[in-house]
Image (cartoon, rainbow, N blue to C red):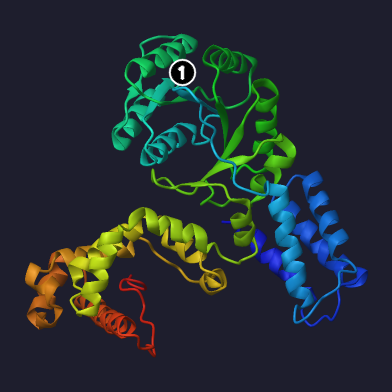
Amino acid sequence: MFENLQEKLESALKKFRGQSTISEENISEAMREIRRALLDADVNINVAKKLVDEISQKAVGKEVKGKLLPEQLIVKIVHDELVEIMGKRMSELSFSSQAPTVILVAGLQGSGKTTFCGKLAKSLKKKGKQPLLVACDIYRPAAILQLQQLAADVKVPVFTQDSKDAVQIAKDAIAYSRKFGRDTVIIDTAGRLTIDEDMMAEVRNISSSVNPKETLFVLDAMIGQDAVNTAKAFHENLTLTGVVLTKMDGDTRGGAALSVLEVVGKPIKFVSTGEKLDSLEPFHPERIASRILGMGDVLTLVEKAEQQFDQKQAEQLEEKIRKNQFTFDDFLEQLKMIQKMGSIRDLLGMIPGMDKQLKNVQIDDTAFKKVEAIILSMTKKERATPKIINGSRRMRIAKGSGMKVQDVNKLLKQFDEMQKMMKSVAHGKKSRFFPKMPGFGMK
């Protein structure tokens, strides 16, 4: 996420290293590079200009106090201005005082709109809500089937009708939600390849008939500034309450995230970072600004971990580690939890400083599948007591998992090192090494 923008901003800010002050002379060159980096990232030209002007105005002549270095001060100013341009703080969903809360979801075809509806339903269900998905995309043949599949995966009901009247479907869905106690109604509307008046008229009619509390526009972040302009056109016709950025895990340049609030006038409420139904995050401007500047995002990483790890299980695991009873079964369970958190590269990228170290490192998420295959090819006794795995057992495990004996040997060695490290940490000792996560580097 934001890799190219991050790299170019870092290059521009390097110009302050070794400087004793921030002057008009040394800031002008850096600001030219920052402006170029923002435009390359497809940030709206007016937004880029405003951002650069604000940074320059606040930086020039700023007194550097104490042990603070000019380069540290300029990074803070850039960070603060990025936060400001993206909305200062997280914008949460609003809920009606009387059920149901209606959330209308709009967007162009292919933006990930229907998938977002499923992700939002899962997220709200985790928070104790009773969502209902509504299929109002009556034109795309696979849209209803896709929403039904998502509803089945999330285990929430979906309202459909064999009708060509999307407005009536939406109205009937509200009545259905009241009858069956569904407190949140998520309406998936029809998308198009381009904005057209018929589409706008239909979605306006749906909106006026159900009076949504939230109207969210789903925007493909990979399209950049063009998508932001589309969101503006929707807002002028529909009155949006927020924007959702999808495909943030792809080759996105970051321009959409930095331009939306200034151009559309409405905040980003969610970002979607993958295909999995768990890959939906609230949009935190300060955290995104930290990621853009390569400062990591530890808070989001912790939140992702908390969603997957149970406190009681964590205490039981700690006890096993203390008693040196951590087995391959325990490791496999932890591995599955980590996989649910998302892409390993994205997770590691949230750790401050890791982006630079991972720049030219290939991390293959499928390596974990190979590790899983090896572990599942072991007997229950072998998983509990790896030391009994001799040469013949290693050959059998390799054959059963479709891997090489060298792969089995490598995993056993890494697991042994990890056990030693865990034991050392559990007993308050400082380990002299930090072994690789078992499976990394496995081809």
* Residue name at image x 81 percent, y 77 percent: 65
**Where 409 sits versus 268, above or below?**
below
* Residue name at image x 29 percent, y 32 percent: 152
Q: Residue furthest bottom?
A: 432
Q: Quadrant of the C terminus?
A: bottom left
**Where 219 sits versus 396, above or below?**
above
Q: Quadrant of residue 149?
A: top left
Please tell me which residue lies in front, 310 or 49: 310
Determine whether, in the image, residue 5 is placed left or right of residue 282: right
Please tell me which residue lies in front, 11 or 417: 417
Q: Quadrant of residue 118?
A: top left
Q: Give x and y (percent) for residue 189.
A: 50, 22
Please tell me which residue lies in front, 82 or 315: 315
Which amino acid type is marked by label 1?
Answer: Tyr
Q: Give x and y (percent) for residue 236.
A: 70, 24
Residue 128 visible in the current orientation: yes
Q: Which residue is mark 1?
A: 139
Q: Residue furthest front?
A: 97
Q: Quadrant of residue 292?
A: bottom right
* Residue name at image x 38 percent, y 38 percent: 122
Q: Give x and y (percent) for residue 391.
A: 11, 83
Residue 402 visible in the current orientation: no
How many residues crowd mark 1 within 10 Å: few (<14), some (14–19), many (20+)? some
